[in-house]
Structure formats: C-alpha cells, structure tokens
Image: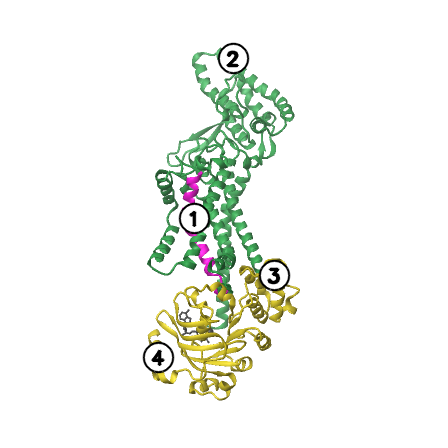
Amino acid sequence: MNLGTRKILDRSFTAVGITSILLMAAALLVVVVPIFSGGIGAIFFKGTIEHRKIQYNEFEKGSRKVIDRQIAEVTPYRQEVYRILDAFEADMETMEPAEKRDYLSKYKKVRDIVAHLLGPIPGDPEPILLRYQYGTTRWEKAEESLHDLMFVTKWDYSNPEEMAKQYFVPRADEFAGTALAALFPYMEKNLDKMLLPEQTFYWGFLTERSLDAHIFGGIWAEIQGTFFLAVGAMLFAFPLGVIAAIYFTEYARENFFTSVLRSANSTLAGVPSIVFGLFGLAFFINTIKVSDSKSVLAGSLTLAIMILPTIIRAAEEAILSVPRAYKEASMGLGSTKWRTILTVILPAALPGIITGGIISLGRAAGETAPIIFTAAVSVGATIGVADVFTQPTPALSWNIYNLASEHEAANEIRHVQYGMVLSLISIVLLLNLSAILLRAHVSKKLKG
Amino acid sequence: MQEVLKKKSGENRALAPRESRKTIGNINVQNPRMVCRNVNVFYDEKQAIRNVSIDIGRNEVLAMIGPSGCGKSTFLRCLNRMNDTIDSCHVTGEILFDGKNIYDASVDVVPLRAQIGMVFQKPNPFPKSIYENVAWAPKIHGIVESKSDADEIVESSLQKAGLWEEVKDRLDQPGTGLSGGQQQRLCIARAIAVSPEVILMDEPCSALDPIATAKIEDLIEELRTQYTIAIVTHSMQQASRVSQRTAFFHLGDLIEVGSTETIFTKPSHQLTEDYITGRYG
Ligand SMILES: Nc1ncnc2c1ncn2[C@@H]1O[C@H](COP(=O)(O)OP(=O)(O)OP(=O)(O)O)[C@@H](O)[C@H]1O
Ligand SMILES: [Mg+2]
C-alpha cells in the first residue's frame, strides 16, 4: 500500500471516528436536555400564592406577614369571581327546569376549574384531600387551566379517512347572554392578580416530604430511601466482595471447587435484576424473615447480592494488577502473608477496588426491579435510620416508575417525575464523579 | 512445541554422564554461615535443582553464575524460603542457617526472612515515601518503637547503602521517583534496615547502567565486612570483581565451586571453562 492510500485511509478513519463520537454526543444531548430542563423545572418555576400558602401552612416556611399581605391583595379580585358565580347561580334558580339542567352540567365544569385554580370556593364544605384544599401552585399549570376555562376542547370526526382533529370553541359562547359571560374575560385579564406568580426557587423539593402523594411537597423520602438502600447494600457487599476477591486471588488453589465458584460468580453477574428481586422476596422475607414484610434491610440485602459479583470482579482485577514485585519485596522482608495483603497489596489495589465499589453503589441506587418486592412503597412516610430494619421506604427508581404509570394524577405532576429523574441521575453521576476523584486522590497518595 | 523442547533438554542431559556432573571443587568453608546439603528443588514434577551441596562462609561474597535457566534464582530463593510463595515449588534436602535447618516445620519464615534479606533483579521499592520504604520492615518486626528509633534506622541504613547524601532532603518523596540505581540502593537499604545476617541478591545490577552498577559493586564490597552475601550475576566481570568464591551452575547441577580467582583463571570442568570463556551461555 503506498503512502497516499495510507494517508487517505488514516484520514477517513479519523473522520468516521469523529462522526461517531459526535453522533453519540448528540444522542446524549437528546436524552439529557429534556431531563435536565424538566427536572430543573421542579425547583425553578413561577410559583403562585397557593404554593407559598402550602409552604407556610405545612412546612412553616415564609413569613406570615407577607402571606397575609398577599392574601389581602388577591382577595378583592377573587371576590369579584365569586360574585359573578353567585349571580349566575341566582339566575339559574329563576330558569326553566330544562334550561337549568342544560346549564347545570356546563356550569359545573366552570366551577370545578375555578376551584382548581383558586382553591375551594367560599361556602363549599372543607375538602378532605389536601390537593383540593389549595389552588394551583405553579403558574404554567394555572395557564393551562385558564385555557381549559376559556375554551371547550372539541374533536372533529367529519373526515373518516383522517384522524380526528382537535379544535377549540370559546366557552363564553356557551354562556352568552348570562351573568357568567363576564367571568371569562375577567379571569383572563386578572388571573395573575389572583395568583401572584413569582419566580420561585424551591430548594425544599429536595429536602421536604411529599404531601398528598406528591401533588405538593418534595421528594426527600425518595432521596433518603435511595440513599439508605444503596449504602445498606454497600455495607454488606463491599467487605464481603473484597474478602472474596482476596480469597480468590491469594488463597484459593486452582481446583474444581474454586473454578465452580468462579463461574458461579460470573453467572451471577449476568442474572437479570428482577430475578434477584424475586429471590430477595422468597429468601430474605419469606424464608429467613429478616423482616415481617418489605423493609430497607431486605432491599439492601437483595441489592447487595446483585452487586456482589461486580465488586468481586473489580477487586480481583485490581488485586491481580498489583505488581508481583511488591508482594515479593514485602515477603522478602519477612512480612506475613496477611500483613502483605493488608499493608502492601490492598493499598496498591485500592483505587481499582474503590472504583468498582462506587460504580456498584451507583448501580444499587438506580435499580428498580430488586426493590419492588423487597423494599419499595409508592407512597410512604420518611423513615428514620432506626426504622430500616422493619420499614419499607419510597425510593427514586421505583417512584419514577410509579409516578409515570400508576399515579392517578400523573399528568398534573410531570415536574415531580422529572425532578426525581434528574435527582437520580445526579446522584449516580455524583457517585461516579466521586469515584474518579477518590481514585485520582488515592493513587496520587500511593505514589507520593 | 513443548514436547519437542522437553525431549531436547532430556537428550542434553542424557548426553552428559552423571559422573561427570558431580560438583568439582571444595564445597566446604571454615565456620560456615549457611550449609546446604543435597538440595533438590521441583516445580511440580520438573526438577530445577539437583542435589546441590555448598557452604556459604561468613563475610564472604559468593557469586553464582551459569547459563540462563540453570536454576541460580531458584537456588537463591531457597536460601530464605522465598520459594514458599510459589505453590508448585517444593524443596528437599537440608539448608542449615547457624546450625538449624530452615526447612524444619518449626521454623517461622517471618524472622528468617528478616535475617536473610533479599534484593531483587528489578528494583522494587514500595509505592510509598523513601522514608516509609526503609522504616516499614523495622516497624513490622517491632525493631523500632519510637519515631526517633525509626529516624535513626532510616538514616543509618541509607548511609550504609550509600544513598543518604542523595536523598536526605527528600525522604518524604516517593521511592518510585528515584533513578533505577538509586531505587536499587534503596532496596538494599530496606533489606539492611532489619539488620539481616545474610543478603541474597538476584542480578541486582542487570537493570542498571555502568555507573550505577559500579556504585552497587562498591557497596557490596563495603557490606561484606558486616554481612554474608550471595549474589547471582550474568556478568563474569562483576563476579570476578565482587566475589571471593564462585559457584557455577548448569542445568540444575552445581558443576564447580572454588575461589573466584581459581574459577576464572584455572577452571577444572570443561563446562565451566566453556562458559567463562564465552563459548556458550
Ligand atoms: N515459577 C516457576 N514455575 C515453574 N518453573 C519454573 C518457575 N521458575 C523457574 N522455573 C524453571 O526452573 C528452571 C530454573 O529457573 P531459574 O529462574 O532458577 O533460572 P535462572 O538460572 O535464574 O535463569 P536466569 O539467569 O534466566 O534468571 C527453569 O527451567 C525455569 O523454567
Ligand atoms: Mg534468575
């Protein structure tokens, strides 16, 4: 092959390499950007006075004075809305029964939307669920509800060849000529004065408990649960894994028994995580009964079993990559085998062992299947450290799934779901980052 | 391929009649420090050392020479039971150190290896500071109790290894950051730090340049006054410069032992002569 062709080949290979890296980066962006922007929205958003009320009433955050002043500010505008509603209700009393029936169902929709926006309408009985005790807390949700109030969504089925088309009809038309007609322009014009949206930095999303199944409040219970489960799994798996790796590399003779052990370990690394979940339920909960039902302990043990093979492998590799010369130097100076392992081999292998450990920690934090049957609940109280032996816990991975698929108000609280996804990804990334930093630190210290 | 090689080496051995492979020369010395009798070493089935008997005297440097693969390292590593760390290796015969067989079941290798130190072919300082490299072994053997004891041992060991002047200002820097020759002297200092009686050296200069080699050779000459030294080397010049006695190994047999001068000027065995005149090896 002549020089010209080789150069062309080299260049085209470089081009292919760069293209594939760019493609990967683009794919990553496509995934990460929505997660990031959606997740940030759980913390940075335009919050309404309803958000501030909840913060004050439930978490004692914010000042009474400011809230009182703002309530005084919004009250006149809200009063006007209630006045219009009252006037229309009074009008309805005077209508013909048929006409009244016709209006009643349409009016109920309007009334519901107003209650959803502003909170319970004065005179109504106090709602039981917290979600009905307050109005809309986020301005962008309020704008969506306003749109629902202003327009009736209709579907055009006229062309059977095509999909039905969505179109909007002003709701005001339904009430033309009645007292309620004034409500629509009034709401549109004055909604911000009734809700007082302010740019809000809701740090409490990460540190506060959830209220009424994540309709309000934060995700601390999930973050803490994830932390308990992952750290618990590490507490079991890390020491066991390192000890097993030491056994495999330094003590085990090559025989049938150890080769069976080795291949069992490799096989275990490839078992699907749902199988570990079922195993955890069958073994830890039903057979040896570490707890009466789901608990953090059972979940941690299950996760520990799942990550054990990875930790063993990483530790084994790290130990094997320690130059034999260190071992000989140590043994040659009359150190015992055990001391050689502790003071020479393990320190030299530490960066690799730590990396394996932290990557497993990240995996334990993110896994869903193993904890479904053993530890996770969708809605639960924030538990204390003392409860980990008996209590189940919400956890990010499981609750992301739950919010996305099973929550009755899934659409209303997409931001919570995004916030959880972003938190989980951040936790895993932070763990991996700290693995890299710790590794760099330890290996620098070992060299110096 | 393996089969062919095995056959070949088998043929080689068959060619030399057993009688002509008996050790020539005087294996005994006055008042020996170590006495080896009928030492055989096997790696699994394969015999690497056959019936070797030799004394190692006090304050002498014994050089071990011979073609590659003849078992020099294997034999050297028997002398402080470093071969224990290789699972497949097993040793028969007697090796007496100060009158006691080191392969006795009752012998603890921990103090033994402190008394019979070892310096390896490739400098292998620990990935710790220079200070820690030297102070580590005295600490684990409980020789030092206080920081000042350790300081003292570190300084005197580095002095003896001729490294003190070069590193006294950077004791806290990594031992692995030194030059190859300095690293090897650090390893010697490390071995000296536990006050051994014998120092085993396996081609200590093979990874070093001539100047670093000369320094180590001078050092060996000095250390001889305090320690017994057994050194494996591939360099005839080195053997003749540093040693008082020389042992020539060939295919697992100890062929000839004698004073270095005799071996290099009037070798008795044909194999020895061939080797030192460079006809093979
Ligand atoms: N760990 C081991 N396992 C099996 N065989 C070994 C092992 N170490 C050495 N041997 C064999 O024992 C014989 C002697 O090896 P040894 O390393 O003692 O030779 P040497 O004289 O030191 O050679 P060199 O000059 O190349 O270092 C060789 O045939 C070698 O293949
Ligand atoms: Mg050798």
Q: Secondary structure at mark 1?
A: helix
Q: Looking at the image, is mark 3 or mark 1 nearer the viewer?
A: 3
Q: Chain of mark 4?
A: B
Dot 4 corresponds to which residue?
B8
Please name the residue shown 63% across and 21% down the image: A72
Q: CA distance from mark 1 to mark 2?
A: 68 Å
Task: Give whichever of B273, A21 is nearer the camera.
Answer: B273
Q: Looking at the image, is mark 1 or mark 4 nearer the viewer?
A: 4
In green, which chain?
A
User: Is most of the magenta stretch helix, strand or loop?
Assistant: helix
Point out which mark residue B150 bears: 3
What is the x, y in percent for residue A363? Answer: 46, 47
Dot 2 corresponds to which residue?
A90
Q: Looking at the image, is mark 4 or mark 3 nearer the viewer?
A: 3
Q: Can residue B53 be seen from the camera position used here?
A: yes
Please name the residue shown 53% across and 44% down the image: A426
Q: Is residue A121 above or below residue B115?
A: above
Q: Chain of mark 2?
A: A
- Asked whether the beta carbons under mark 3 and mark 1 sit within 8 Å of each other, the answer is no
Q: Are marks 2 and 4 on the same chain?
A: no
Mark 1 crowdedness (10 Å alpha carbons): few <14, some 14-19, many ≥20: many
Q: Quadrant of the C terminus of chain A?
A: bottom right
Q: Is residue A286 above or below residue A356?
A: above
User: Magenta segment, which residues?
Assistant: A296-325
Dot 1 corresponds to which residue?
A307
In yellow, which chain?
B
Q: Can residue B279 be seen from the camera position used here?
A: no
Q: Is residue B36 above or below residue B173?
A: below
Q: Secondary structure at mark 3?
A: helix
Q: CA distance from mark 4 to mark 3?
A: 54 Å
What is the x, y in percent for residue A225? Answer: 48, 38
